[in-house]
Amino acid sequence: MRWFVLLFLFVVQFAGTAHAALREVDPGDVPKLAPDQGLLLIAIDTDFNFDSLRIQREGSLSSEVINGIRPGTTSQLYVATAGKYYFEHTSIASWEYRLGNDPEFHFEVKAGVVNYPGDLIFRKVGAWRSRRWLSNRGLRAMDWIETTHPALRAIPFEYSGIYPDPFPAFYRAERGGRAVDLSKPANAAAGATAKAPADVEDLWRPNRVRVIRMNGAGDLVAEISRDEKSWNVDLINLARGASMRLLRIDTPIASLAWKGDRALLVTFERSFGESVGVIQIADPDPDHPHAELFGVPRPGYIVDTLPADPTHFLFASLTTTGSLRIDRLDISTKQAVESAASAEHLALGIANATRWFADGSGQLRAALAPKDGKSALFYGGNGKYRAVELPESVAPIDLSPEGDLIYALADGAAGERDLVAFDPAAGTIRATLFAKPGVDVESALLDRDGHAVGAVYYNEGTLVSEYFDPARTRLEASVQRAFPGESVLISDYDDARHHVLLRVESAARPPSYFYLDLAKNQASPIDEGYPWLHDRPFAPTHVIHAKGSDGLPIEAYLTLPKGDRPRPLVVLAHGGPIGVRDTLRFDPEVQFIASLGYAVLQVNFRGSEGFGKSFLEAGKGHYGTLIEDDVDAALTAALASEPLDRTRMCALGASYGGYSSLISSIRWPERYRCVVSMMGVSDRVLFFTASDSGRSKEGRAAAEDIMGDPRRDLKAMLESSPLYRYGELKVPLLLVHGTDDPRVDYEHTRRLARMLALAGRPPELITVDGAGHGFATAEQRKQVWPAIAAFLQKYLGAP
């Protein structure tokens, strides 16, 4: 009995202590904090209703539960005992999702301050799934404190994440005693809009031709096309020069491949995953077409089309127990397809494989699967495989038809990305199939049997195909002569290689598709990706070479509209900045700006993809310094040789490009009349706590590798952050940002706009509700680009 009483008293005392760990603060209350207490601000941003969120203190039996959470942002303030806490779990429609096992959702509460672990964000993915993460929206949180608990605004505010956030203290010091009217909307609209000669909706509509393929006989071409209402499979009879529609459906069509000369494999994207169908073409006569679609009776995807086998393909699906199975399916008859009764089940032998490779005979020989937290290669056959150690830079493309080689991209001895043949049996690179100094290979060219016959790479912005054998080299040369200066890819050809499909594109030409009859040496247009732009002229682009401040060669592209006077210039910096590049392919942003009469300069500064590993590595750690030196070097070269008006220039960019535009205008204020930053980084330190890159240990390590570590490099990061140098941002500024940006949180724009407003120089601002990292819908683009056009015309004037 004595033990029971003691245990009861202990539990009551412990529970009372645990219960006191969190106590909600109502608006208007001014709590008196004990020496071991602080305040805790919890903010939840969700796009759906859910039942509850539990907040737990480590070592405590009781917890705080927030119930009935509705879409929008819910904020609550608590008196909290100092210690370590975590978000324990959420309850959504009787489903519970544990968060406490993930260290990303743990945080610390300090005494004497307002502790803020970041907004806990929920985004719905499907009927029963959601994504959850923390994002530092400290200024929004401080504004909420000031509005809801004004008596508590004097208490120091601290972000309690992994990295420091010096902004709250900076903001408090810079603001001083100045009042801020928080009742005004944060998204003051930019001024007037302008209609450009090139319409926004037409320029950004997606390519209507998604996939185009020729059969082995060379008499039929099949394509996936898309219009505003449907996805389609169309058939073009080359002999008749006419097309017919085989399929019209509202489900996205992902892929298309010929099986023989009169059957097509088609993959559909469904809400429950992919599904596969077979279109049997009984009569390809456009006047009397006859074709029939058969569906494989269970969801799954194509592993290998088996080009050498006209009546079978390899199909992957899940069993009732959730394991993967791969079958060799017969498509010779409707009954065989719809019943899958003739399926030959293949032995797998590797659990959790993410990709399978088959040889030319259709036998599974290799797979990629997770191992020790990384993707590993397994090689063998007949259900027996062994792990093969891949060099870190080797990225498999495909398996040779003989099954003895893996075609892959890999870093070569000189640092460029080469096309190689990797020997999985020996675990070494057997041969380098293609390498070019200063150039990264983009992909391999495979023949119908699956042999590597060439490589694709960019040469001065133009996509080039280079073949290994003389016959294909001569074919490529004749193709390039037909379309000089343009990116020409051989999309497909017949078995005899007498008929060829070409995809042609350039900076001034949207993608178009041609049929090349080699016997007649004649190319005929077969379709257009953007037929609504057919009659519109576009400004041409040419290459400019420069050298960075340390002598590094820099490649840039200048798009120059017609005119008899020096043109105003927009410097358009790309995003990334590491592993991204500009090319001479058709770019709606470039042509929209050029349609206003402004020249456009794009710079492949250090860190850009495609110029070798050493060039890419040279960009790491040089945000706002050597990268922007490269931009200015290219600009200097362009001004020296081109008909440009150096008195009328504006910097514009998105993501890193927005950051580059901001920091360049600070470093060279005399250069620019204005700046447009779209979803741009203003605070380099904030990027680590308000970005999808900072949500995991692996993402943070990658970000530190290319950007630096805020815990170690804080001073340098602040010196190269536009936010902390807002006093030097003197030029007119337009900020454009989506409210649901997972890569560069809207908090970047909120902070910079606030500081500039305090300085009496509020920027023009376009806030796009619901937009992510980019403007994906026609409505969003119509909100953004005409306003940008008006801003440019306001400060650059008429061309």
Image (cartoon, helix red, strand yellow):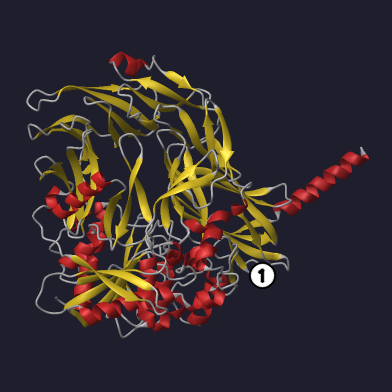
- Residue 162 falls in image quadrant: bottom right
Q: Position of residue 411 (x, y in %)?
A: 46, 56
Quarter of the picture holding the N terminus: top right
Circle 1 SS class: loop
Q: Residue at x 9, y 28 (%)?
A: 286
Number of labels in the image equals: 1
Q: Nearer the viewer, residue 240 or 389?
A: 389
Q: Residue at x 41, y 73 (%)?
A: 627
Horizontal and vertical percent for residue 149?
A: 54, 67
Instruction: Depth check: give the residue in front, 13 or 254.
Output: 254
Q: Is residue 184 visible?
A: no
The image quadrant that residue 548 belongs to is bottom left
Q: Is 415 placed left or right of 55 in the picture?
A: left
**Vertical order, 150 against 235 (above or below):** below
Neighbours of disc 1 within 10 Å: few (<14), some (14-19), many (20+):
some
Tell me where residue 237 appears, x and y as whole percent. Answer: 12, 32
Taking the image as shown, residue 566 lies to the left or right of residue 174, namely: left
Residue 796 in view: yes
Please identify the residue farthest to the front as the structure is shown: 470
Residue nearest the viewer, comparing 292 with 481: 481
Quadrant location of the C terminus?
bottom left
Question: Could you say where residue 244 lies in the image, as x and y percent from the top left?
Answer: 13, 31
Q: Nearer the viewer, residue 134 or 386?
A: 386
**Farthest bottom residue?**
670
- Residue that label 1 marks: 112
Amino acid type shown at disc 1: Gly
Q: Residue furthest right?
A: 2
- Answer above or below: position of 571 versus 645: above
